[in-house]
Amino acid sequence: MKNSTIYSDKKEIKLQGEDEKLKDGTIKIYQNSKKIKTIQADEQGKWNQKIKLSNDFSGYIKIKQYNEYGTLIGEKKTKVKVDNEKPEFTSFPKNQTLVTRGKTKLTFLAQDNDKIDKYKIYLGGKIYKTKTNSFAIPTNTPQGTQYLRVRAYDKAGNSSYRETFVLVR
């Protein structure tokens, strides 16, 4: 089983699995090193369990899977970080900023308790995506006053946005 990191904006996560070798077996769930739950898989090897986490949980969830005879057949340790804090913009273009197609690069900046994962930019009726805090005005952007909205996302999916109008020439 592959180890990974899960970012969640919720305090409850659902764990589930299905493995034919696990039929009528047992699943033990650990939060950091403490066992928090033991559940049974059904006759097809399916199982699921919701677990509650604190608002600021950052740690590991470990799942150990045992077949019907008690033999360990699988183990997965996953880092989980609960983050329900929205990003905040600290820098954004002023209203009616003059921009030139193909030449101007707009900059903006959002901060988060973890880090910003991506930005989505809406300009001139189109949506653009970037991982950086700047955006070059495309050459095909319509001239005139255009609505600009930038939405910042963190890894957990929390988002916030700022909006303004820019004058495109």
Image (cartoon, grey):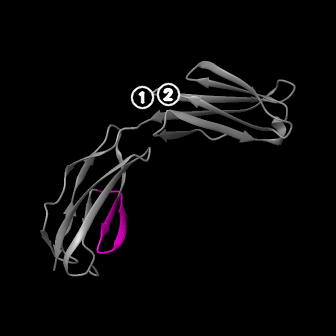
- In magenta segment, residue 122: yes
- In magenta segment, residue 45: no
Q: Quadrant of the C terminus?
A: bottom left
Q: CA distance from mark 2 to mark 1?
A: 10 Å
Rendered image: mark on residue 87:
none
The amino acid type found where label 1 is placed reads Asp
Tag 2 secondary structure: strand
- Measured as percent of width and height from the top left, residue 149 is found at 28, 62
Q: Quadrant of the N terminus?
A: top right
Quick one: label 2, few (<14), some, or many (20+) residues within 10 Å? some
| The residue stretch that appears in magenta | 120-132
Specify the farthest residue to the top. 34
Magenta span dominant secondary structure? strand
Picture residue at 22% right of the left edge, 56% below the top: 108
Quick one: label 1, few (<14), some, or many (20+) residues within 10 Å? few
Is 41 placed left or right of 92 in the picture? right
Task: Tally the marks.
Answer: 2
Is 15 placed left or right of 6 in the picture? right
- Measured as percent of width and height from the top left, residue 150 is found at 29, 59
Q: Nearer the viewer, residue 148 or 6?
A: 148
* Image vertical order of residue 35 relative to residue 14, above or below: above
* Image vertical order of residue 132 relative to residue 71, above or below: below
Picture residue at 71% right of the left edge, 40% below the top: 17
Picture residue at 79% right of the left edge, 33% below the top: 41
Q: Nearer the viewer, residue 163 or 111?
A: 163
Q: Single out the mark in the foreground, 2 or 1.
A: 1
The amino acid type found where label 2 is placed reads Gly
Q: Which residue is mark 1?
A: 56
Tag 1 secondary structure: loop
- Measured as percent of width and height from the top left, residue 71 is found at 82, 26
Q: Which residue is mark 2?
A: 59
